[in-house]
Image (cartoon, helix red, strand yellow):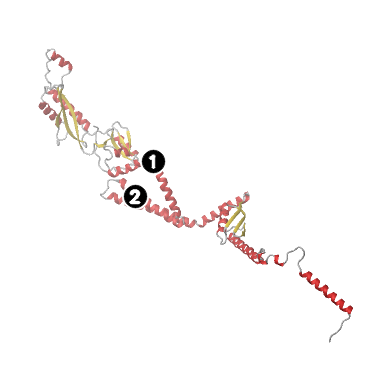
Amino acid sequence: MRTRLSGPLAALLFTLALGVGAASAQDAAPPAGLPDAAGLPDAAGLPDAGDPLDTAEAVSADLLESRRLAQRLQDTGLADVSVTVRDGVAELQGVVLAPEDRERAAQVAAQQPGIARVDNRVVLSTRFTDRVATASELALDKVTRLLAALPLLLVAIAVVALAWWFGKWLGRRLGARIARRNWQSENPFFASLVQQLVQWLVLLGGVLVALDLLGATALVGAVMGSAGVIGLALGFAFKDIAENYVAGVLLSIRRPFAPGELLRIDNAHEGKVAALTSRATVLVTHDGNRLTLPNALVFKSVVLNFSSNPKRRLEFTIPLDVEESIRHVQEIALDAIRAIDGVASDPGPSWTVDAYDAGGITLRFFAWVDQRQCDLGKVRSEAIHAVRTGLADAGVRTPRNIQYTTELVDGAAPAPHPHPHPHPREAAADMSVNRDLDAHLVAEQRAHASEDLLPEDEPVVEPSPR
């Protein structure tokens, strides 16, 4: 059913409808001066301001790492060190007493998983009270450790002492066995050397066991390395001393001479052997003085041992006139030499022509003497005296002098040779061994008895001066 509206009412309704439509169109249109919807940027192209949830998770992870690292520092005794972790960087702050604590804090932080870099801002305390407290704690800690390790230290000292005693006992036993054997039995220094070597080896083993008990075996390598370097340096610095010592050892083992023997060394030094020490060979010269020669010089030089053979040969020369009979003179001289006490009969005296010229003849005579029974110098002097006396009694002339030759040239008659008169028989001379140096030799042997490397129990040939 249709309702017909009146004219005024219909016009009012139409006007209201137009107003509502214009207001809707105005709200839908863009503001004046702004681009329309086609000109606006897409929502996907706007910058992302970050997810608040992700940021919260990162902050929570750094806080967790800081707490974990702080706990580790506290467990290691670094409670005064604070830590802050940001994006894998650990920042350390605080005050410590020792530089070792500062370094240890940095090491602990660097070992934490997820830490890429450590910013160590820990400083050292400079307060006097802190330093005193630290020193006191360190001293107390060392005393406490020492007291705790005292029983073990006493056991280690006992092991070293036992090794020293056992080494001396074992070395003495081995040295005595070597001395009783025929091989090297006459060389006491060899037995002493073996004794000391065994003693030091056993002591070294005891020291190693003691260090192992104390947990200081790492110290052995350092000590051995240092000993090697020091030994090399000392070897170069004391080369001569080491050379003399080694030469003394070799001389004692080879034993080219014995105490009391007469030596000539390097054709320049002569004397009786008093002692052989680890450094030098001590001689007593014919005038009673002490002569000390380095062992290296003795070992490398030519050594003439006059006492190696009990029998020693003496020699002397007799000049004669050229007109004398050599055969007649040598018979007289040999008979005179054989009649002397101390001259050996086997081998007997001998002779040879030493020189023959216009000035005269020189005969050289030889004889052997047992040095254990007679003195070489005394027998030689007596032999010269006996030959001279025998030749004088036989009228044997010595070489002419210049005045006698001049008289013959001038035609003057030579003076008549006096008739030989026999010399009166003299008392027998003393041919015993010369003991003048015995007191000096004994004094030197006693002075070096503690360091002498030569034995004294075997019989020594008593040589006499040449």
Q: Residue 418 location, x and y as percent?
A: 12, 18
Name the disc covering residue 238, or none. Answer: 1
The answer to the question of whether label 1 and label 2 lie on touching residues, with beta carbons closer than 8 A, is no
Res 217 → quadrant: bottom left
Q: With respect to residue 306, does 386 lie above or below?
A: above
Res. 223 visible in picture: yes
- Which of 345 and 442 lies nearest the eye of the viewer? 345
Residue under the image location 41 percent in, 43 percent down: 233
Q: Residue 25 location, x and y as percent?
A: 78, 71
Left or right of 294 on screen, residue 332: left
| Residue assigned mark 2 | 195
Residue under the image location 11 percent in, 28 percent down: 331
Name the disc covering residue 367, or none. Answer: none
Left or right of 371 on screen, residue 327: left
Q: Amino acid at mark 2?
A: Gln
Left or right of 321 on screen, residue 282: right
Q: Secondary structure at mark 1?
A: loop
Res 384 → quadrant: top left
How crowded pointer 2 is (Cα within 10 Å; few <14, some 14-19, many 20+) is rated as many
Q: Amino acid at mark 1?
A: Phe
Which mark is nearer the camera, 1 or 2?
1
The quadrant the C terminus occupies is: top left
Q: Residue 19 location, x and y as percent?
A: 83, 72
Ranked by sequence position, the earlier of labels 1 and 2 is: 2
